[in-house]
Amino acid sequence: MKIVERVKALLGRDAVLEDTGAPDGLPRVAPASPDAVALLLGTAREEGWRVRVEGAGTWMPADAAADLALTTRRLDRVPSIQPQDLAATAEAGIGCDQLRQQLADRGAWLALDPPGLAGRTLGSVVATATAGPLRHGFGAVRDHLVGVTFVTGDGRLVQSGGRVMKNVAGYDLTKLQAGGFGAFGVIVLVHLRLRALPRVDQTLVLEGSREDLSRVADDITAAGLTLAALELFSPALARRDRWVLAVRLAGSAALVGAEEAGLRSATGGQFSALRADEAHAFWMRAAEAFATRPVTFRVGGLPDSSDDLLDLIQHQVGDEWVSASPGAGTLRWTGETTVDRLRRLRRTLAAQEVPLTVERAAWPLRRAVGHFGAYREGVGPLVAGLRHTFDPGNAIAVAVESEDRAG
Amino acid sequence: MIDHALVEALTQIVGERHVRTAGAERATYAKDGLTVHRRLPAVVVLPGSRDEVIAVVRLLAVHGVPFVPRGAGTGLSGGALADQDAVLLVLTRLNRILKVDPRNRVATVEPGVVNVKLSVAAAPHGLLYAPDPSSQSACTIGGNVAENAGGPHCLKYGVTATHVLALEVVLADGQVIQLGSPGGEAWGPDLVGLFVGSEGNFGVATRITVRLLPVPRAVRTLLADFPALRTAGEAVSAVIASGIVPAALEMMDHSCIQAVEDSVYAAGYPRDAAAVLLVELDGRVDDSVAADAASVEAILKDHGARSVRTAVDARERERLWQGRKKAFGAMGRLSRDLVVQDAVVPRSSLPDVLEAIGRIGERYGLTVSNVFHAGDGNLHPNISFDGRIPGLRARVDAASGEMMAACIVAGGTITGEHGIGLDKLRYMPLIFDGDSLTAMRGVRRVFDPAERVNPGKVVPVHACREWAGVRNAEFQARNAEVGTRSASRGDGVSSSALRVPSSAVGS
Ligand SMILES: Cc1cc2nc3c(=O)[nH]c(=O)nc-3n(C[C@H](O)[C@H](O)[C@H](O)COP(=O)(O)OP(=O)(O)OC[C@H]3O[C@@H](n4cnc5c(N)ncnc54)[C@H](O)[C@@H]3O)c2cc1C
């Protein structure tokens, strides 16, 4: 029996999307429940099918070589929002914009502003651990998760964590899934830690040369201000003539007022405030830009190396589309580049103990350099072992490590 | 087997003084902070350096001997206990702070560094290490990493996992690996995050790089007193829902208040209160902290607080905290034995769950005191008893089990910070199904194929089951019954009560 017929028999006729077939002609399957995902992957294991996992298809190109595509887009329910507990449970295929709206309706907020288009799925944000500028104030993606349920490559439904705010029962497999790029299973359900919608949300920007703004950023960091975000944008990303240092303040009126005053006194009062609609557009456009160029990667160093990292990146791959979070030491780049350049950059950075993670790229580049590249000594066998534990038949098509293990 | 030759070889590595074989010496290490469990290790070894740890672990690998890493032994789940066939590897001599980097706000320490000493070392730079377990003057950072320890101020700043950036780990076979990077970005999957909270099952952490935070310049500490446990619980929920994130939000009940006030740590808590809440707000600017404190005070009063007292100076604040931090010790004086429990529930269910716990205690005729991290919903119902009274221990056990069940039914979990260790093994199948436990065991075996490091902890091996055959049959049978589209959307997340525990599913 052909794959399509088999899947229809297994999950029902409407599980196979007819009209929106993948560009490469792969059958695209949209399971409607975690159980259905488990059944599909269990069958894939038995049949030896290779499966490409997709969300809404707005972030990672849908081009990994496989026998069928599994999209999470029908796993788009939000079974629980508990504003009084600041907790929610959402299926992995929900669009971030939809989730944000549903949370806001209940006065709650997920303090994550991932790069990419508004409709990006929650599962893709978790799997790639792509936090945005709010990471400065509210932490990495993993810090917003209290549990996930995922399906292994051989169709087992596994739960880790729970839905309460603290949990040390068993090993923390949630951490493995956050940023695992799907190598350890398909995330189907995500339990989230929320915040109350901030009463005041203020964005201030300053334009200038990169050098000047880096100095200002240092002053701000030294002042120990409580900021939601502190992000340096290249002119192209900010859509301005010069580099832009953007500060976001979020919280109670008292907190935002005090921190804005602190910001002005630490920097000589040069920042200008954006109106709410301008601020929304500013952050959204920058986030979207990361999904429109062919390659996006992130690097993470120590805060005091932020400037040097920018220099290095400018030198090796150009700094047209780049943003840096000087307080956190992280940096995100997007643009066009080659396998060789990426490998060279990754090697140079590795010598400085700075990892480079390829967040998105076309399959040939992903396969050649891997999301993670080569690991440090002794870590490769562990990752391979974990891969084998969660996907014994190698059913999930994902390029976590570099093809030649050199880059 | 641990024979004389192996002891001799251990002695060669660490020196005679640091290998303990006499019964009395080993007995010192037979318990941790939860004294109901007792295991006598075959040998106790105290390496003095990372290289000695590596040499010991390699030697034990060659001989196939199991071993248990141990920090200060303050754990509350029987995690750091070793059986007769195992070596106890005590890491307290690895107690150097290797680096404090104020510019990047990071520090690197050896695992035996006592938690509070790191904050003391960071203080001259205006920095601190945020996770502050109540045992912080004794417990080690290595033990904190292994347990993913929490503390009162983790409500705002996050538990240990939030603060660990990089680790050096000695695996069971003696291989040394580096996980994470100084900036916190992972090299590949987040193995640092996976290691934190693995209770010594994945290897020995020999170097730990953590994030430091600026010491807050403005602090307000409030003590609110409530005539009923329920209203105190409701007040917690209201504070959380308000969007203000206190640095700490702790609760002590009537019985705990009496114990503290009867001890040398008497903090001036009102003895007639059914419960008190200790709430701390902190930040950079006094005005905004004061404004938040005023809002919190109003919420507490709206929810039935009889009075709200604000600490006037650092001394009073210190005293209020001293009572809280020493509460376990004070309760330990109530009777010969103390079982410290640990569970987490959704914060809005605190009032109901506290009442349920009270009823369970009454039914079993036991003294239950509560002192806990209320802001996180992290309960610590503690049972004081005299284990010499026939039948009492069994009653305590049964009551503990019912309390755990009540927390699970409320959508909670069986431990928020003390870990599974030996003590909670039996509850694991209540919250995880066979597939989830099998997956955990699989991960453990990637790090330690022979399951030699801290054997018999965390995952109840007997409960790991393979469901593969069952699942397909079950799934198809269910859909045949429904008779319509396979795997169509239901009302819930999954209709499989068999495999998805209640805590995985939103209500
Ligand atoms: C009075 C009192 C109050 C407490 N309050 C809190 C609290 O507020 N919050 C909280 O979270 N806990 C609390 N605890 C529990 C306990 O202090 C913590 O679990 C602490 O993290 C244990 O540290 P330790 O050094 O004593 O570790 P140990 O008890 O010696 O060991 C605990 C576990 O860690 C493993 N381990 C130790 N070192 C290493 C290492 N280097 N590498 C790998 N594995 C290792 C051991 O094998 C064991 O499984 C309290 C305990 C007491 C007695």
Image (cartoon, rainbow, N blue to C red):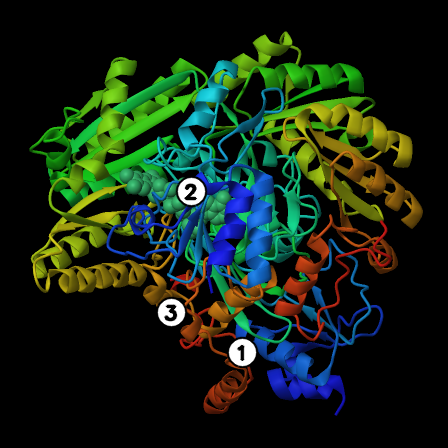
Q: Identify the secondary structure beneath mark 1.
A: loop
| In this rendering, the label closer to the viewer, 3 or 1 | 3
Give the amino acid type for the residue marked by disc 3 in the picture.
Answer: Pro
Number of other residues with Cα within 10 Å of mark 2, as a class: few under 14, some 14 to 19, many 20 or more: many
Residue A173 position (above or below residue A213): below
Q: What mark, if any, has residue B90 been given in the picture?
A: none
Ligand 1 is found in the corner quadrant, namely top left
Query: Answer yes or no: do the residues labelled 3 and 2 have beta carbons within 8 Å?
Result: no
Question: From this viewpoint, is residue A308 visible?
Answer: yes
Marks 1 and 2, Cα distance to the nearest angstrom? 51 Å
Residue that carries the numbered disc 3 in the rendered image: B429
Q: Position of residue A239 (x, y in %)?
A: 79, 30
Residue that carries the numbered disc 2 in the rendered image: B71
Residue B420 position (above or below residue B296): below
Q: Residue at x 38, y 65 (%)?
A: B428
Residue that carries the numbered disc 1 in the rendered image: B488
